């Protein structure tokens, strides 16, 4: 059965992307329109101005986590898991109006690794995923932004797990085009919606839908340098009959340096489809604690 809801979401998001362009074009062509501001190009900009999806476990980032699983369908694994994530986003080029560096366009590359290790079985690697992609973001205002791009996810089963359990790897390499919108509707609140379309399981081309909401407080901890935050992310896959994986984080948020980098210390809750692509047909539920670093 074809599910029309994700396709309606895709059409609505495309309309949102096109409509502001039409309005801005009409304004530019109106009689007496003000002179366009000068554009400035920046190679390797100091930050990524499209907001990050903080609680998304498949976003390239750096993290060390310990997880306790209350339930897992992955056979012959313990209830303790160590997670290692490496990677991030690199701005390649930003084009913005003079004096307004948080508006305009930015081309970025992202890449990373996410692996999980079974603490109860000699810290054997259960599985890992590699990511990379390129995105073009358009910040219409400092609060409203869109992005379009491509993402690659290559999944792998751990050698130790394969040898111990005798489970060979499956072919799961997802190549998808994405279209997203992010809206900061108050100084502390942000929400987003992202649609993806591409191949996952062999001989399939399917959709994904991701959405979330996040809150970052004023900087009033650790001598006014840190905030507390809460974030929620949900992702569903057509290939999995729209089963939802939901993750939530609560913790401290500490900006560092001059490139938009942040440290986070957080508690994470998650349930639904396994984060590891090799086990995408299986569900897990967990609670974890971790250190996260974005750059």
Image (spheres, rainbow, N blue to C red):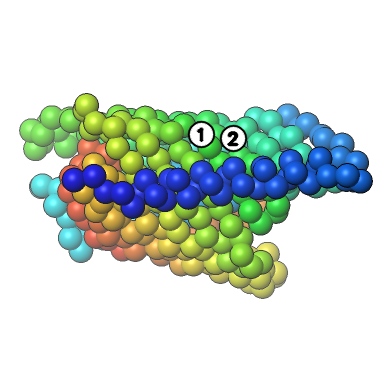
**Residue 79: horizontal and vertical position, in percent?**
19, 57
**Residue 156: horizontal and vertical position, in percent?**
26, 32
Please state if 288 lies on the left or on the right of 99 as rendered: left
Q: CA distance from mark 2 to mark 1?
A: 6 Å
Q: Residue at x 56, y 41 (%)?
A: 147
Please state if 260 lies on the left or on the right of 249 as rendered: right
Mark 2: secondary structure: strand
Q: Count the marks: how many?
A: 2
Question: Most extreme residue toward the front, as rendered?
Answer: 31
Q: Residue at x 37, y 46 (%)?
A: 7
Asked if 295 appears above or below 284 in the picture, the reply is above
Please state if 169 lies on the left or on the right of 52 as rendered: left
Q: Quadrant of residue 69?
A: bottom left
Marks 2,1: beta carbons within 8 A: yes
Question: Most extreme residue toward the bottom, as rendered?
Answer: 220
Mark 1: secondary structure: strand
The front one of 259 and 230 is 230
Q: Looking at the image, tell me whether mark 2 or mark 1 is earlier in sequence order.
A: 2
Q: Which residue is mark 2?
A: 136
Q: Residues within 10 Å of mark 2 (few under 14, many from 20)?
A: many
Residue 149 numbered mark, or none: 1
Q: Quadrant of the N terminus?
A: top left
Q: Residue at x 45, y 59 (%)?
A: 212
């Amino acid at each position: 059965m074809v599910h029309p809801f994700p396709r309606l979401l895709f059409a609505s998001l495309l309309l949102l992307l096109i409509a502001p362009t039409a309005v801005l074009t009409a304004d530019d062509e109106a009689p007496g329109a003000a002179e366009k501001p000068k554009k400035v190009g920046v190679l390797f900009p100091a930050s990524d101005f499209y907001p990050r999806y903080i609680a998304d476990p498949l976003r390239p980032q750096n993290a060390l986590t310990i997880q306790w699983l209350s339930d897992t369908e992955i056979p012959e694994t313990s209830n303790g898991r160590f997670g290692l994530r490496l990677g991030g986003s690199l701005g390649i080029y930003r084009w913005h109006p003079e004096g307004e560096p948080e508006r305009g366009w930015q081309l970025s590359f992202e890449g990373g690794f996410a692996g999980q290790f079974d603490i109860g079985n000699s810290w054997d690697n259960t599985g890992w995923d590699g990511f990379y992609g390129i995105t073009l973001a358009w910040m219409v205002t400092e609060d409203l932004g869109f992005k379009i791009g491509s993402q690659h996810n290559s999944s792998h089963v751990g050698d130790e797990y394969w040898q111990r359990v005798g489970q060979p790897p499956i072919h799961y390499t997802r190549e998808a085009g994405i279209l997203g919108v992010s809206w900061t509707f108050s100084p502390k609140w942000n929400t987003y919606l992202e649609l993806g379309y591409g191949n996952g399981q062999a001989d399939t081309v399917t959709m994904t839908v991701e959405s979330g909401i996040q809150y970052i407080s004023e900087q009033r901890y650790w001598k006014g340098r840190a905030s507390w935050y809460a974030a929620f992310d949900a992702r569903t896959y057509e290939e999995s009959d729209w089963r939802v994986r939901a993750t939530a984080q609560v913790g401290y948020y500490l900006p560092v340096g001059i490139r938009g980098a942040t440290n986070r210390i957080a508690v994470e809750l998650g349930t639904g489809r396994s984060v590891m692509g090799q086990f995408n047909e299986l569900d897990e539920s967990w609670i974890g604690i971790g250190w996260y670093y974005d750059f």
